[in-house]
Image (cartoon, helix red, strand yellow):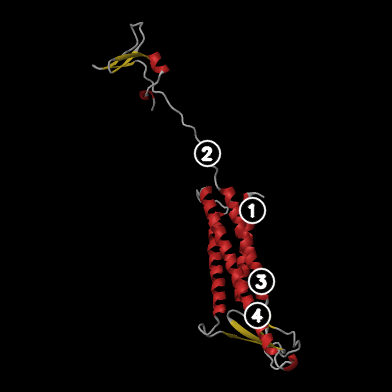
Amino acid sequence: MSTTTLQVVGFLLSILGLAGCIAATGMDMWSTQDLYDNPVTAVFQYEGLWRSCVRQSSGFTECRPYFTILGLPAMLQAVRALMIVGIVLGAISLLVSIFALKCIRIGSMEDSAKANMTLTSGIMFIVSGLCAIAGVSVFANMLVTNFWMSTANMYTGMGGMVQTVQTRYTFGAALFVGWVAGGLTLIGGVMMCIACRGLAPEETNYKAVSYHASGHNVAYKPGGFKASTGFGSNTKNKKIYDGGARTEEDVQSHPSKYDYV
């Protein structure tokens, strides 16, 4: 799979996961009334993160928001916080990933910048998916604990006869939506992190090249500077350093530090 395809697929999966997290957070059916012992009832109750609802057999539904914050269970408030943090991180990473798409060219943005933005958005998508999965799992654990505690309180007394009638709640549709949405967001973030490797530019090694200075027809003497024209003499031009004479053939065969730039 090419880098562009991997990045686009991860981006689309993350969008679907983020939309599912938002939908699950706003749904009212996080917990629904268990109808195992009483399948025929005139009232059906279900609860969400923000309000509780009652649906009658006539089809009329009445919902009541939670008007308190401090009076709610600590686990419910923790689930709220996890879902909100996951949605906020997902929204920010969505904005970053739009500019990081390889198929979209914005100005003179380099591939290295797109690679860094893709990696950042992928990590944020992963954290967002983990927050959603953690929030839904915490709520599910709370439901399981309350269900078995209610069951133990119902069947008490002589011979295991039912002495009290309590409303038990089981998993609602929002839990399954949240699990699937968190998984999609997590997978999308992983795919974008993998696509980051293909966007990073490869390093190029350059070999150093030394250059020789053109020093012909120039002679250096202790007494001063003299430039010869090369006419009227059959002898070879010489370079003299500190009183010592060296021919050009010797200089070329044994270069010194003055021959390099």
Q: Which mark is first along the chain, 2 or 3?
A: 3
Q: Is residue 108 left or right of residue 155?
A: left
Which percent across, then down, holds residue 6?
64, 53
Residue 99 visible in the displayed image: no
Which percent across, then down, holds residue 235?
35, 7
For the point 60% across and 53% down, the residue is 194
Quadrant in the picture for residue 36: bottom right
Which percent across, then down, holds residue 82?
55, 71
Q: Which residue is mark 2?
A: 204
**Counting other residues with Cα less than 10 Å from the Cα at mark 3, is it few (<14), some (14-19), or many (20 or more)?**
many
Residue closest to the eye, 144 or 39: 144
- Which structural element holds mark 1? helix
Question: Mark 1 and mark 2 in contact (Cβ < 8 Å)?
Answer: no
Q: Which residue is farthest left?
A: 223
For badge 4, the amino acid type reads Ser
Q: Is residue 204 left or right of residue 211?
A: right
Separation of residues labelled 3 and 2 (CA atoms) = 48 Å
- Which structural element holds mark 2? loop
Q: Which mark is first along the chain, 4 or 3?
A: 4
Nearer mark to the viewer, of 4 and 1: 4
Q: Which residue is mark 3?
A: 177
For the point 40% across and 18% down, the residue is 254
For badge 2, the amino acid type reads Thr
- Which structural element holds mark 4? strand
